[in-house]
Image (cartoon, rainbow, N blue to C red):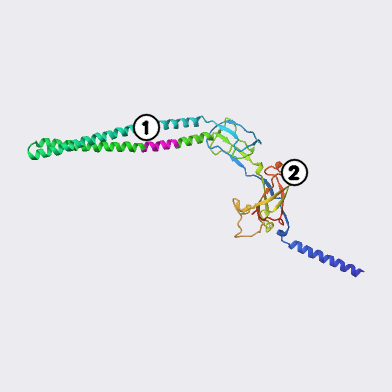
Amino acid sequence: MKTYLKIIIALIAAIVAFSGFFILNRPESAKTLQSTDDAYVRADLTVVAPHVAGLISEVLVADNQHVAADELLLRIDERELQIRLANVGAEINSLEAQLTRQQSVITQARAAVDASAASLKLAENDRQRFAILARSGSGSVQAAQQAEKEWATQTAALARDRAGLRSAELQVAVLQAELDKARAEQDDAELKLSYAAVRAPVAGVVSQRRARAGAYTSVGEALLTIVPLEEIYVEANFRETQLANVRVGQAVDVSVDALPGVRLQGRVESLGAASGASFSLLPPHNASGNFTKITQRLPVRIELDKHQPEAARLRVGMSVRPSIDTGSDGAGRD
């Protein structure tokens, strides 16, 4: 009987030892459920900053207020912007008037060219006639010389008037270029005037509101942050040894530390391209010296399923514990 008990005990010990050896040597990635407590609720926060500088004349939202996309958040004093727009408008009117006037200048220059051409033609006829008379002795050499001088004078006058016409025509191009530039400045002034009304680029909840009425703000200064709670997700940092069988599209069960008993469902949306340590200011390098192997963690982005009422209670930064079912089908979600 004692021998029989010894055999049973030895057999049980062998089974326990074998099981322990199998469990201890089983790869961590072989588990069907992969979970971590290094996971948090995240959202793609939008920092609102003005495109123009000036005094904040009005703030229309409060902290933790929900705003819709394109909703007016605040106003910047636009009087200086309106003055600039008015000045540019006056410059455009002036240039348009100059262009209209320049057409009259061109018409006058063309008339002068026509008159000079006619005078030159007459001078050319006189020149030829007096030259013939001088050679035949019927006219004086002085008269021929006078006709030659008049012809040269009219030739120069025609060249002068043609140059004046060319200059007047070129001035149109100059004025047109200035007008185009002024119109571009007008578009810029109108755009900057529209920036005086700061609107929400996305829907979400107002946070970190620094904007105060009467305060001066500079271009690019962070005035508030919008948190799109409707688009929150979970960022989980899994050990690299857990990810061998994790695939995009696999089902995820998420428990929330702040909400006992609440369990949310989601899917693996994407796997990070690098570990968190790779993006640190001073990433670790073990190329020399004593080497200590440290298991790295890689981020996994988890998308929560829609139409879960309890998801509305989540806030960015909350700690969660996701469990990925690596046995679920992730096909079609890659």
* Magenta region includes residue 174: yes
**Residues drawn in magenta:** 173-183
Specify the amino acid type for callout 1: Thr
Question: Which residue is at 21% across, 38% downward?
Answer: 155
Residue 37: where, in percent of width, then height?
Answer: 71, 50
Front in this rendered view, residue 164 or 74: 164
For residue 268, which numbered disc appears in the image? Answer: none
Residue 259 magenta-highlighted: no
Mark 1 Cα within 10 Å, few/some/many (few <14, many 20+)? few
Answer with left or right where residue 114 lies relative to residue 88.
left
Label 2 is placed on what type of residue? Answer: Leu
Up-down: is 242 above or below 176? below
Q: Quadrant of the N terminus?
A: bottom right
The mark found on residue 259 in the picture is: 2
- Residue drawn at point x = 20 percent, y = 37 percent: 121
Q: Position of residue 174 (x, y in %)?
A: 36, 37
In this picture, is 242 found above or below 71?
A: below
Q: Nearer the viewer, residue 170 or 296?
A: 170
Nearest to N terminus: mark 1 or mark 2: 1
Determine which residue is flagged by label 1. 100
In this rendering, the answer to whether 307 lies above or below 190 is: below
Q: Quadrant of the C terminus?
A: bottom right
Q: Residue furthest right?
A: 1
Mark 2, residues whose alpha carbon is within 10 Å: few (<14), some, or many (≥20)? some
